[in-house]
């Protein structure tokens, strides 16, 4: 499956106004991303960094990623294998940082309906989330170039792929 769609993703719920300091705490910023990730959300969900599994999704209230512009706040979720963050709204800086590092964000006005521990499916290109029982929640459309960036693994990976020397035979 692609990085812009998944099925069976387990949900981790958070409240509104999750800031970048909760995602990448200042005390850990002197370390590499692998160490910072171990402290991700420790002030809100001490069980998160040790319990999240590749393919899980984070569902939050409005204003996810407010605070500083630190790119590590998005990179830690990629490091931990989070497939997507679903929220009614995101900080503008966080939104762009996330796509730059290959983290999918889905803006969904009805994200509050999704419950902790549910297993959901999502398709960013179709702008939809499917809950257990088949309920479909609409997401805002994401420009194709941002979805392509996620598929590539982020902006740097996309540029490396695009500008690799072509070997002719």
Image (tube, helix red, strand yellow):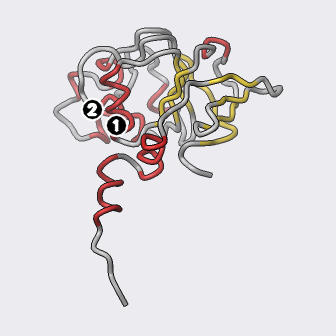
Residue 4 occupies quadrant: top right
Left or right? Give the position of 125 relative to 136.
left
Residue 19 rendering spot, x and y as whole percentages? 34, 15
How far is mark 2 from mark 1, CA to CA? 6 Å
Left or right? Give the position of 136 relative to 43.
right
The residue shown at (41%, 46%) is: 149
Left or right? Give the position of 158 relative to 140.
left
Residue 20 rendering spot, x and y as whole percentages? 31, 20
Left or right? Give the position of 121 relative to 62.
right
Farthest left residue in view: 30
Residue 2 rendering spot, x and y as whole percentages? 58, 50
Q: Secondary structure at mark 1?
A: helix
| Residue 92 higher or lower than 160, as above or below | above
The residue shown at (47%, 36%) is: 143
| Residue 156 higher or lower than 27, as above or below | below
Residue 71: give its label: 2
Residue 137 rendering spot, x and y as whole percentages? 69, 22
The residue shown at (35%, 54%) is: 158
Q: Label 1 belongs to which residue?
A: 75
The residue shown at (41%, 9%) is: 17
Q: How many marks?
A: 2
Classify the position of the C terminus by image quarter: bottom left
| Residue 77 higher or lower than 156, as above or below | above
Q: Are marks 2 and 1 in contact (CB under 8 Å)?
A: yes
Residue 79 occupies quadrant: top left
Q: Secondary structure at mark 2?
A: loop
Circle 1: is it few (<14), some (14-19), or many (20+) Cα within 10 Å? many
Circle 2: is it few (<14), some (14-19), or many (20+) Cα within 10 Å? some
Residue 4: give its label: none
């Amino acid at each position: 499956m692609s990085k812009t769609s998944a099925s069976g993703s387990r949900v981790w719920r958070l409240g509104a106004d999750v800031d970048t300091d909760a995602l990448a705490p200042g005390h850990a910023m002197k370390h590499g991303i692998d160490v910072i990730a171990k402290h991700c959300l420790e002030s809100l969900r001490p069980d998160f960094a040790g319990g999240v599994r590749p393919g899980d999704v984070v569902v939050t209230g409005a204003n996810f990623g407010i605070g500083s512009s630190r790119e590590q706040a998005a990179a830690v979720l990629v490091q931990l294998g989070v497939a997507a963050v679903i929220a009614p709204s995101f900080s503008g800086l966080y939104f762009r940082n996330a796509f730059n590092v290959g983290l999918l964000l889905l803006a969904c006005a009805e994200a509050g309906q999704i419950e902790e521990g549910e297993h959901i499916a999502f398709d960013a290109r179709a702008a939809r989330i499917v809950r257990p029982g088949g309920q479909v929640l609409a997401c805002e459309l994401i420009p194709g170039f941002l979805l392509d960036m996620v598929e590539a693994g982020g902006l740097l990976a996309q540029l490396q792929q695009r500008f690799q020397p072509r070997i002719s035979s």
